[in-house]
Image (tube, rainbow, N blue to C red):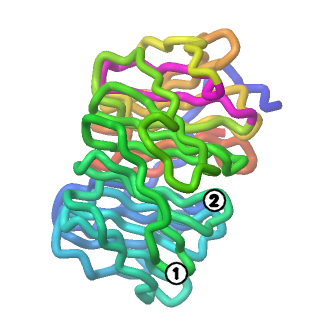
Amino acid sequence: MFNWPREICDWNVKEFGGHKDEVNSVAFSPDFEMMVTGSDDERVRIFNAKTKQMICKLKGHTGAVRSVAISPNSKYIASGSFDKSILVWVTRSASLLHRLEGHSKSVEVVVFSPDSSHLCSGSWDRTAVLWNLETGEAVRVFRGHTGMIQSIAFSQCGKWLATGSWDYTVRVWGLKQPDPSEEDSLVMSCHKGNIHAVTFSKNGMLASGSWDKTICLWNPRNGRLLHVLKGHKGWVQALSFSLDGCFLASASDDGSVRLWDVVTAECLNVLEGHTDIAQQCGFTQTGALVASGAAFIALKLFP
């Protein structure tokens, strides 16, 4: 278990540039050595997060890139776009592996499964689609939300999928059903705004972050609400559990990153004043906290 200090210092700040328009999404490889960004300029850029060097640009979309993701094994990069498509790239060669088409509206989120064998996408068309990366085929379509799906998370055991929507609800789906229907999902409702982030902890807790500026902690097996975390003054953009599941980091467009004790629901630390929009956050294998702001792409490491 990590013993977090009450005061966490800004250890390293790096700025990345190159996009010609607003950056919508940032993703890190599991070792945090590679960073991928997606922009309204229809491009995906890959950076070395340590040296700030841009490795390459990925072209292929004909609309704004709304979401990017790197597979857990770092072999693939995925991007979802306003052009309704998902592109899957081979990281080593930067070659296009699949163009996935099936959504009827903009693709707002793409997420890889823990074993890197599948990809799930969420769209303005109010559906989430599970794709087989070996074949490029859609294997399941999740329906039931009445609003756009902007956040998706796989449980670490690979048995559950959570979707967060602009209908203010979180749904948890079992991945064993061959043809999931609305009745196959567990609906969790507490938020009073669009849900922008969902994530599972190692021990199975589920967290959701909303435009209502709150974070809800859930037991996803029965839908029980465990805690409501309050403190952010802006929309909650991203969430990440520590590797042991004892702490939660939240990034907000109020420019801050907050660190929470998930057992006591206490806010342990507030990191603020570094970015216009804190868009992404995550924990490294050593327990360091990484946060990025899409307004000018900054990488911050907090030991």
Please check the rendered image and state whether residue 101 is part of the magenta-colored stretch, yes or no: no
Q: Is mark 2 on a helix, strand or loop?
A: loop
Residue behind mark 2: 30
Residue at 67 percent of width and 51 percent of height: 158
Q: Nearer the viewer, residue 259 or 107?
A: 107
Image location of residue 303, percent across then percent down: 66, 39
Image location of residue 228, percent across then percent down: 50, 12
Task: Report if residue 273 is visible in the image.
Answer: no
Q: Is mark 1 on a helix, strand or loop?
A: loop
Please check the rendered image and state whether residue 212 is part of the magenta-colored stretch, yes or no: yes
Residue 135: which numbered mark, if any? 1
Name the amino acid type tagged 2.
Pro
Residue at 44 percent of width and 40 percent of height: 163
Name the amino acid type tagged 1.
Thr
Q: Seen from this angle, which residue lies furthest right?
A: 1
Query: What is the spatial separation of the Cα atoms under label 1 and label 2, in whole angstroms?
Result: 24 Å
On screen, residue 275 versus residue 89, left or right, reads left
Task: Report if residue 300 is visible in the image.
Answer: yes
Say which of marks 1 and 2 sits in front.
1
Q: Which of 51 and 184 is in front in this view?
A: 184
Image location of residue 30, percent across then percent down: 63, 59
Classify mark 1: residues with Cα within 10 Å, few (<14), some (14-19) or many (20+).
few
Q: Give the range drawn in magenta.
A: 203-221
On screen, residue 140 versus residue 25, left or right, reads right
Residue 275 to residue 205: above or below: below
Classify mark 2: residues with Cα within 10 Å, few (<14), some (14-19) or many (20+).
some
Does label 1 or label 2 sit earlier along the sequence? 2
